[in-house]
Image (cartoon, grey):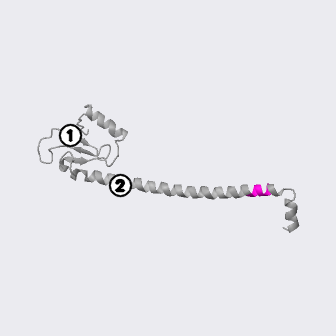
Amino acid sequence: MENSTVQNLFSGISSSAFFIALALFAGFVFGCFVQKLKSAAEIKRQRRDAVNRSRAVLGGQFSEQLAPFLPGFPCNPGDARFIGKPVDFVAFPGSAEGGSINEIYFIEVKTAQSKLSARERQIKEAVEHGRVKYFEYRIP
């Protein structure tokens, strides 16, 4: 464009209106830039959080498998059978030594501040209230 054409283009606009429009445009561009920075920071935070949660889950799964061999486990490790879901172990105290089995334990292993899930609480309540049955199923 020629210089006179540019002058004609902006001749109808006052200089203050031009600077206001320029400031608004600059603000818009700056706002977009800041938003991209915030989004990038949020994505980084979410990725860090996902990695930390994944590590916690893997650590919990490892701990579940190791639990029978740690101090304070409620029975002999040979008596416990790992199930995983909905409870971690079912144990038959006395079975490893060939003794009589007078009790059956449902064992849920938790690490740190983890809490029972809704399903785990339901199972705990069913056992505590004696709502447990034994079935013998014969294949037809």
**Structural distance between the alpha carbons of marks 1 and 2:** 28 Å
Q: Which residues are magenta?
A: 17-22
Residue at the image point whose x is 55% and y is 58% from the top: 40
Compare residues 40 and 121 and report the one nearer the observer: 40
Q: Is residue 103 left or right of residue 18?
A: left
Q: Amino acid at mark 2?
A: Leu
Task: State yes or no: residue 20 in magenta.
Answer: yes
Q: Is residue 16 left or right of residue 85?
A: right
Q: Main secondary structure of the magenta part?
A: helix
Q: Quadrant of residue 5?
A: bottom right
Residue 13, placed above or below residue 95: below
In the image, residue 140 lies at what x, y percent?
Answer: 26, 38
Q: Is residue 93 left or right of residue 129?
A: left
Q: Badge 1, how many Cα within 10 Å: few under 14, some, many 20+?
A: few
Residue most extreme to the front: 16
Q: Quadrant of residue 52?
A: bottom left
Residue 104: mark in rendering: 1
In the image, residue 21 lies at what x, y percent?
Answer: 76, 55
Residue at the image point whose x is 72% and y is 55% from the top: 24
Q: Which residue position is annotated with label 2?
A: 58
Disc 1 element: loop
In the image, residue 10 lies at what x, y percent?
Answer: 84, 59
